[in-house]
Image: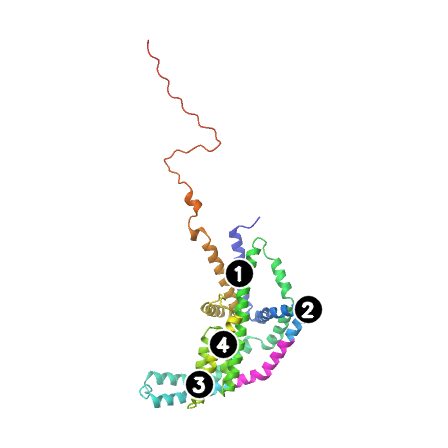
């Protein structure tokens, strides 16, 4: 006999509460496991394709791990040092850039750059803040990341977790499916399939888009001669998951830096602007339709809200689970709306209800079919005529 709906709601609510408490209390401990699980989820289709090509699961997982390790070593040796150096140089050069901007505006727009004017005061305050806090901010980002996440443990645990979860991914899915309540198993499988479709379209597709565009912007800007091309390309690729924001923010930053570096060389400035125009065309017409698709079901505003809410509530680990949670909540909300639109609350009375006769309170009730007819009362006997 199935549990009543009220009892089921209590049990599911308790399970959700336990999960939230675990995220809040064990955030720093769960971080490498969540990262490893996310990487394993991302790479599982690759392992499945290698299995279909004839490799065993062990060989497929080993090949993927070896390739990922090689890419990681190349990034650490070649890209990360250059990225850190350019970031430090950009922070150190920012005060001089603001001073040059003030001089340019003062020469071209003297009325707007009066000492008591709003523009002059704002630029001066921003320049002083960057000069005082810029180096501390760059160092603080690195130091805080190293202190919040135990970096050595992170580097050791994440590859191990990724390897074993990728190796046992299919068996884990079968075990979880075997634990589903039998009454709700078909519905849960359907919802899980929809969540997986959204995550596969967004996470796998959008991460690929970010990597491709970030690499394109970084390489193209460095070839164009922009001093901080790697930093700008990495930044533009990182925020590409928000439509138009990545190209807009990266383009403004790159063109602004190009104005300072190539002032008067309009061909170089146009080249930098053209790089972002080409990147935006590729993103909108080729890369995103191929890898992400047009119907993901994860609105950018909802995604930003989930990142902000989960990050504020659970810290860094909350930001890791924000995208899967946003996808799951979106699927559940659409499922609830679908059920609501099929219910009497939305559709109103059905045709059977409208055709049912409305009994009048004054009408006599008819005897039920098959019941014995009620005995009629005999009329009073007439009085005999007197003789």
Q: The magenta stretch spans which residues?
A: 66-87
Crowd band around label 3 with a 10 angstrom C-alpha radius: few (<14), some (14–19), many (20+): few
Between marks 3 and 1, how big is the CA–CA gap?
53 Å
Q: Position of residue 152 (x, y in %)?
A: 60, 77
Any part of residue 303 in sight: yes
N-terminal-most mark, 2 or 3: 2
Q: Which residue is mark 3?
A: 270
N-terminal-most mark, 1 or 4: 1
Q: Is 68 part of what is drawn in magenta?
A: yes
Between marks 1 and 4, how big is the CA–CA gap?
41 Å
User: Tag 3, which secondary structure?
Assistant: helix
Crowd band around label 2 with a 10 angstrom C-alpha radius: few (<14), some (14–19), many (20+): some
Q: Which residue is mark 4?
A: 282
Between marks 2 and 1, how big is the CA–CA gap?
37 Å
Between marks 2 and 4, how big is the CA–CA gap?
37 Å
Q: Which residue is mark 2?
A: 56
Q: Is 133 part of what is drawn in magenta?
A: no
């Amino acid at each position: 006999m199935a549990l009543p709906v009220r009892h089921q709601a209590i049990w599911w609510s308790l399970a959700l509460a336990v999960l939230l408490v675990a995220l809040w209390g064990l955030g720093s401990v769960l971080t490498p496991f969540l990262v490893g699980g996310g990487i394993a989820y991302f790479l599982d289709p690759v392992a499945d394709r290698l299995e279909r090509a004839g490799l065993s699961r062990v060989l497929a997982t080993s090949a993927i791990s070896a390739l990922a390790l090689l890419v990681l070593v190349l990034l650490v040796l070649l890209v990360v040092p250059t990225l850190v150096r350019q970031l430090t140089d950009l922070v150190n050069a920012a005060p001089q850039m603001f001073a040059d901007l003030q001089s340019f505006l003062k020469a071209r727009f003297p009325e707007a750059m009066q000492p008591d004017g709003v523009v002059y005061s704002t630029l001066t305050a921003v320049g002083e803040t960057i000069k005082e806090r810029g180096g501390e901010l760059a160092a603080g980002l690195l130091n805080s990341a190293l202190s919040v996440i135990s970096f050595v443990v992170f580097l050791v645990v994440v590859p191990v977790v990724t390897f074993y979860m990728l190796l046992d991914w299919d068996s884990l899915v079968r075990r979880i499916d075997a634990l589903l309540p039998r009454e709700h198993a078909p519905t849960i499988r359907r919802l899980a399939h929809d969540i997986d479709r959204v995550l596969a379209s967004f996470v796998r597709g959008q991460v690929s888009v970010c990597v491709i565009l970030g690499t394109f912007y970084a390489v193209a800007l460095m070839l164009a001669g922009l001093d901080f091309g790697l930093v700008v390309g990495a930044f533009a690729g990182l925020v590409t998951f928000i439509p138009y924001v990545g190209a807009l923010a990266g383009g403004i930053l790159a063109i602004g830096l190009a104005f300072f570096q190539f002032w008067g060389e309009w061909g170089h400035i146009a080249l930098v602007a053209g790089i972002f125009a080409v990147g935006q065309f590729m993103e909108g017409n080729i890369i995103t339709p191929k890898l992400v698709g047009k119907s993901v079901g994860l609105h950018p505003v909802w995604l930003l809200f989930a990142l902000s809410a989960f990050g504020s509530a659970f810290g860094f680990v909350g930001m890791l689970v924000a995208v899967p949670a946003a996808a799951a909540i979106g699927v559940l909300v659409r499922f609830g709306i679908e059920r609501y639109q099929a219910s009497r609350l939305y559709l109103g009375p059905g045709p059977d209800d409208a055709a049912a006769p409305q009994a009048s309170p004054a009408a006599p009730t008819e005897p039920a079919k098959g019941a014995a007819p009620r005995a009629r009362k005999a009329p009073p006997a007439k009085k005999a005529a007197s003789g």
